[in-house]
Image (cartoon, grey):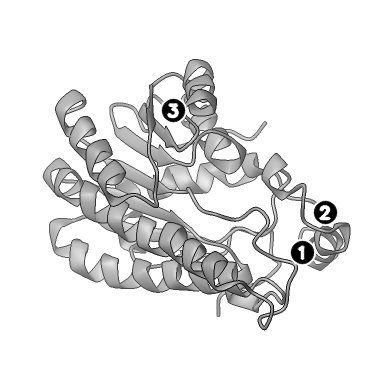
Amino acid sequence: MTQPAVSLDGRTILITGAARGLGREIALAFARTGARLVLADIDLGAVTETARQAGGRAVAVDLDDPGSITDLAEGIAATEGVLHGLVNNAALATNVGGMGFEEIDLDLWDRVMRINVRGTWLMTRACAPMLRASGSGRVVNVASDTALWGAPRLLSYTASKGAVMAMTRSLARELGPDRVGVTCVAPGILTTESTDYVPAARHQLYGDGRAVPGPQSPQEITGTIAFLLSDAALTLTGQVLPVNNGFVFNG
């Protein structure tokens, strides 16, 4: 299993969407770096199990509810007193694709945008005072390389992740004067339970098209995310990193 080589010892990190999939693997990896973890998800039972395995504290949050986000941030301020890093990983991804742009239901489109885009903004806004106060705050937004290559039949999700990339750049400029770094990772399809619904042909497309062929596990990108949360990563602020084994390149 790939492990982050970067130490996050003494740093308090909030990971959203930590109940399963990539978020869970980030938590398990960070547990070996010395980080103090706050793990958030709408599924409190599942994220509590992640916290049991990784350590740290599990909390419930609903990114579709601004009040829930505010309560989460206020709770961290009261119990932890500090926040050094935020991983905006939670997103609505399951069962949002497989249809052409003319077939997308308006309610689905709006819900994807509320959770993936508005939720990322609201979470960052709620945590920003603590990140600023830490003196070395870091935000890592988890997007998707679908927004870099234009995945078909996935428009609402692709558009939402493109918006997350754009927000990363603007937030980097707004938070940079306070030495808060904001970066974005854009993985491809990962081998998690969250992608079981993706057609085998799409998995094959990725596997065959990567510079390093084959499937990509979530464990392969946790080290990159750990580095982006470290003191050494401030010079990368505003960057979007396609951590996808070379399926697409930034150029």
Residue drawn 54% across the image and 54% down it: 92
| In the image, residue 230 above or below residue 236 | above
Q: Quadrant of the C terminus?
A: bottom right
Which of 240 and 66 lies nearest the eye of the viewer?
A: 66
Type of amino acid under label 1: Arg
Q: Name, please, the residue furthest toward the bottom.
A: 102
Please tell me whether mark 2 sits on a helix, a strand or a loop.
loop
Say which amino acid is labelled 2.
Gly
The label number, if any, that marks residue 210 in the structure image: 1
User: Regarding mark 1 in the picture, which secondary structure is present there?
Assistant: loop
Give yes or no for contact between labels 1 and 3 (Cβ–Cβ under 8 Å).
no
Q: Residue at x 71, y 77 (%)?
A: 152
What is the CA distance from the residue labelled 3 to the residue labelled 2?
28 Å
Give the class, few, some or many, for how many residues have Cα within 10 Å of label 1's Cα (few <14, many ≥20): some
Sort mark 3 into few (<14), some (14-19) or many (20+) by Cα contacts within 10 Å: some
Residue 138 marker: none
Task: Find residue 70 and report its horizontal and vertical position in percent.
Answer: 23, 44
The kind of residue tagged 3 is Thr
State which quadrant residue 231 falls in. Answer: top left
For mark 2, what is the residue?
A: 214
Up-down relation of residue 96 to residue 225 (above or below): below
**Could you tell me which quadrant the N terminus lies in?**
top right
- Tell which circle, 3 or 2, labels the residue nearer the N-terminal end: 3
Q: What is the number of callouts on the image?
A: 3
Q: Which residue is drawn at 60% across and 56% down?
A: 93
Label ID, residue 33 = 3
Q: Where is residue 218 in the image (x, y as percent from the top left)?
A: 64, 43
223 or 70, which lies in front?
70
Q: Residue 53 at what x, y percent from top left?
A: 53, 18
The image position of residue 120, as x and y in percent, is 37, 57
Residue found 87% across the figure and 57% down from its top: 200
Could you tell me if the residues under marks 1 and 2 are in contact, i.e. CB atoms within 8 Å? yes
